[in-house]
Structure formats: C-alpha cells, structure tokens
Image (cartoon, rainbow, N blue to C red):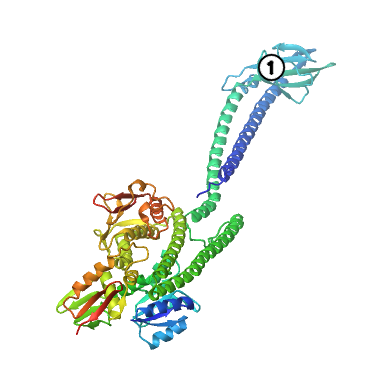
Amino acid sequence: MSTEASVSGSLRRRLALTLIGGAAVLAVLMFVAVRNYAVQVAQRGQDSILAASVTSMLDTASLHDDAVEVDLPYAAFAMLSTPADDRIFYAIFRDGAFLSGDADVVLDPDARSIPQFQSARVRQTAVRQVSASRTLIGADTRTDIQIVLAQTQDALSETLRQISRNAAFLGLGFFALAAGLSFWATSLTIRPLDRLTNSVTVRGPQDLRPFTKPVPDEMAPLVTSLNSLMTRLDQSLSQSEDFIAEAAHRVRTPLATVRSYAETTLQRVDKEENREAMRAMVRAIDESSRAAGQLLDHAMITFRADHLEREDLDLVALTTDLVTRLTPIAEMRDVSLSVLAQGKVRYSGDPILIQNAIRNLMDNALKYAPAESDVVIAVRSEPHIQIEVVDQGPGYPANQIDVLTSRFQRGENAGDTIGSGLGLTIAQDVARAHGGDLQLSNKAEGGACAILQLS
Amino acid sequence: MKFLLVEDNSELATAITSRMRIDGHVIDHAVNLQDATAFVETEEYDLILLDIMLPDGDGRDFLKRNRAGDLNTPVIVLTARSQVSDRIGSLDMGADDYITKPFDHAELEARCRAVLRRKSGTAKTRVELGGMIFDPVAGHLIVGDTTVTLRNRELRLLELLIAAPGRVFSKQKLADRLFSYDEDVSDNAIEVYVGRLRKHLDKSDLKITTLRGLGYRLDYEH
C-alpha cells in the first residue's frame, strides 16, 4: 500500500532555473555595457585625432588680397593613418560655398570654431566627419572659412569587433561560472531536505521517534508538524495494539474458564448425551479461539509483509526451536517430529513471519497425521532455500489443491478437524513477501507435502 | 505433583484447580504477585503456572526477579496473547514454556511432562506397585529387569488406571482423555491401547480386566 505523492514542479529545478536565468540576464547586460563603453572610448579617440587634424589644417588658412589660401600640412594627414588604411575625404568652404576638395562631402550648416562631429555618408560609405570653421580677417574684409574632414571607420570597426568578441567570451565565462555556482547553491539548499527525506525513508515501520537532528530555520515548522504527526500515530498505534491485546485477553480468559469447566464436567458426568454436549462445547471453544488467533495473526502478517524487517537468521535453529515447542503436542498424538538439515541455513528475513508460516504448516501436518506416524521437516539451502513439511496423513484432496491457499478455504476431507482456513493463506503470504511461494503436493506413497520456498 | 497457579481471574483459577485435582494433583492458588512470592518462599513446588497480566505487575518481572534469585522451579507461562513476539519474550525471561489460553488440559499436562523431563529427567513421584515401577515423566515402565519406553497414549492410559486401582473406567471416558476433541475415534481404538498395556504388564502382578458393557479396571493380584 504505497501512495505516490502528487508532484507539481521541483524546488531544485525552480531554484536552479531562477539562478541561471538571472545569471544569463546579467551576462547579457554586462556584454552590452562593456561593448557600448568600448564604442564610446574608441569613437572619442578617433574624434580627437580628427579634431586635431582639422585644427592644424585651419591654422594654415590665410587671406591674401581677398583670396583664401590653405596649405594642407602633411602632418595633418599623417596622424590620421590607420592599420586598416582608412580613406580620408575633405572639403573646404568659404562662407558656406564649396571652394575645394571633395565635392561629395557635405558641410554641416552649424559648423563653428569649435569642431562639430557627426556620422555621415560619403558616396555610400559610412564615415565619421568633423566640421570646423575659422574667421579670417583681411585689410578690409572678414570671411569665414570651413573645413570638413571625414574618415572611414574600418580600423575602428575591427577594434570594436575584437572588443565585442572578448566581451562575449567574458560574458559566457561569467555565465558558466554563475551557472555552476547556482547548481552548487541549489544542492546545498536542498541537501537538508534530502537528509530529512532519507532519515524518514530508512526508518523501520515501528520507529516513530521524533526527529532531533538540527534543520535550517525554514524547515523547522515542517519537522515540528512531522514530529507531532508521528507522536499522534505512535499513540494511536500503541492504543490499537493495546486494544487488540486487551481484547484478546478479555475474550480468551472467559473462554479458558468455560473450557476448563467443560473438561471437568466431562470427567464427572456419565450420561452419554451430556458428554456429547460437553464435547461439542469444547470443540466450539477451540474453533472460536483458533479463529480469533488466526485472524489476529493474519492481520499482523499482512501489516509486517508490507514493511518487511529482515534479520539474519539460521533457518535450522528457527525450525528446531519450533519443533521443540510443538513436540509435546505431537507426543499427545503419538506422532514423532523430526528435523532433517545439515549445518546452518542462513537467510535474511522476518523471523516472526517465517516462524508463523512454518508453525502453520506443522500444525496442519500434526492435525492430519495418523497416530504413530512421522512428520519430517527438511530445511534445505540447495537448490533453493526451502522448508519442506511432509506427513503421512491422507494428503490434500487432489481436486482442491490449487484453492487451499485461498482465505477460509478448507479441504473437503477436513471433517471434524478444527481449523480456521487461514493457515495455508498465512504461509503463502509469508512466502510471497519473501519473494518465494508455497507449493502443495501429495506424495506418491501418501501424505501431504508443503514446501515453503524463500528467495 | 504440586503446582502453584498464579492467576488473577478467580473463575478461571477455580476451573483450572478443580480440573487438576481430578488428576490427583495438589494445587495452590495465588491471585497476585505478592501472594505468589509468599507461596514460593514457604513452599516447594514441582511447577509454577504463571499468568502474565496480573493486578500488581507483569508476570514476566516476577519471573526475572526469581530467576535472578535461586528459584529453579520450572515455570509455564499462561498467556492470552497470540503474538509470537510476546511468546518469545516470556521464554527469554526464563520461562520454560508457555501455553495460550484457552488450553487443552491434556496439552498442559504434556507440556508439564516435557518441561519436567528436560529439567530433572525423572519424576520424584515414581509409582511402585505390583512388581513394576512406573515413571510418568520419563515415560518408563520397569517390570522385572526389562525397561519399556511407553508411547504417550499408553503412558496416559496407565497413569489414569494406576491413579485409581479397582475403579471402573468406561471406554468413552478413557477415549475422552486419550484423544483430542477433534479426532475421529473408532470404537476399538481404546482396545488397541489396552491390549498393548496388557502386554507390557504381563510379567507384573497388575492386570487390566475387561468388564463387558462397563469398561476396564486395573486389578492387583497378590
């Protein structure tokens, strides 16, 4: 009877996804910020060279008899040279009118003495251009001269590409590191929960002690409620155990009284019909007490089979103990009980269940064995671990052999024999709980053979 | 034999004691552990029948205390529980055997005999009569210089007859004592066991007489 919890999401996954998602966003933001900053710095560098260059060109401008003279200095172009061999365009204007240079270069109408920068296009090529102006004063004239200097941005783009690539690597590295840290942090956070789960799982079914190991603050309410649940469960379990013990005591004690009186009376009365009544009474008492005992045993076995508590056992010792215990009953019927085994047969199983199963098989054998016959119990480890109980009684009814292990099913030849019809069911349940089975057969030479096979 | 019964339920105690007196046993009854302790200190018993749930404590504690002292008397625990673990528990505490209520007196007797045989080997009360010696605990019958080990039913039959020589036992009464209540007993089953006993007693002065329509009687020939 194991119930699966209904699962909605996973704390571990949710936590890990949140942390990794956060790391991804941070990595992208970092990449964008680094790249933008690099663009700005690079642009500023190009701009300042362009400004210096245009200023030195303007410096050479002079006015001679109303003619403008500009002597372009070599240094002005030399400082603009780049590894990518960027091209340079320039144009000179006088009072806004094109004077000389490249006619495709457009003058910024707002050009002042302070250099103005702008990104523009010259014949479809993206350029960065600077416009600056200077006022020339002659003898009686005054004229404004403007120079526009433009440069392509191949070297700058290359630099930016490199910086972007490095920034991307940095971002990826940051992301990988953050993701690793997320997994670590997640498992660190989940670990106390796992530990709690583990310590609940490894507990035996009878272990209902409260948890005392320290847990994180957030888990304290969970553990507190779990502990209070365990306490209540423990109380109600021990109450029902006490109840069953008390109920058995209350029922069995008066039954024992009636039985003893009936036996005593049977010794004293002589009239056959009275004696028959007394015998019937004793039979009824035996029947009811046996049924009550078997029902309780069956309930206990069903419970224990669900939560098998395995121990290392020697099946030979266990069987020998049982045989010693049942010998007086066998003697009463002049039946001999013997164990066939060599050395020890080690097995890991629930001793109470196995004992109960063998006891039921032996009870059956003793009930049906004729006087002065032998019941042999063989304990084997080869080829399988099994306990075989063989008697010399009438055997199982051949047509019923398959249904005898059903609950409350009794053989047609059971006759007056007292039984509850649960013995073989119990033995089979025990065998199956241990991964084996109960095999019933009749011996060719007569007699029933029950094999409790374990694995 | 001399028994001490420790049982708080007076009805059950009365039923058990009257049943056991029929078999000729002497039996004292203690209703709680305090009484039981007093009895054990003043009297010597062959066997103690001990209930577990008693008004002034757990019978197993009494057992443990006395086993730690020098009480060697065999103890059979009477339990109303059927849990195997409970039974094992009482054996660990020093009980020699246990029996579940309600019990068959024949089974109790068989268990007593088994416990006594394990503890001492022979009965203190061996019966010597008419040239034979009968040891009910060991199950031996000695006639002259031959020792026979009796089968259980032969033994119980002899025990019944020898307790009251000269008394007539009907076939039915003997069958009720020898067979359990769920056994199909044929009419001549008793005759078989009587026949065997006669053979064993052949060389002694004891004789089992058949009284037609009445039953059997053990006679002692001088």
Q: Is residue A343 left or right of residue A300?
A: left
Amino acid on which the number 1 mark rests in the picture: Arg
Most distant residue in the left direction: B145
Q: Residue at x 43, y 84 (%)?
A: B37
Q: Note whether B208 is above or below A21 in the view shown.
A: below
Secondary structure under tag 1 reads strand
Residue A330 spot, x, y in % from top left: 30, 65
Q: Is residue A71 left or right of residue A301?
A: right
Q: Residue at x 35, y 53 (%)?
A: A413
The residue where tag 1 is placed is: A121
Q: Residue at x 62, y 23 (%)?
A: A79
Residue B55 spot, x, y in % from top left: 50, 78
Residue B151 spot, x, y in % from top left: 24, 69
How many numbered marks does the figure carry? 1
Which quarter of the picture shows residue A133? top right
Sort mark 1 into few (<14), some (14-19) or many (20+) by Cα contacts within 10 Å: some
Between B153 and B215, the one nearer to me in the picture: B215
Q: Is residue B117 visible?
A: no
Give the chain of mark 1.
A
Between B109 and B67, the one nearer to me in the picture: B109
Q: Is residue A399 left or right of residue B52?
A: left
Most distant residue in the front direction: B212
Which quarter of the picture shows residue B17? bottom left
Most distant residue in the bottom direction: B42
Between B140 and B50, the one nearer to me in the picture: B140
Q: Note whether B125 is above or below A201 in the view shown.
A: below
Q: Is residue A363 visible?
A: yes
Residue A219 spot, x, y in % from top left: 59, 55
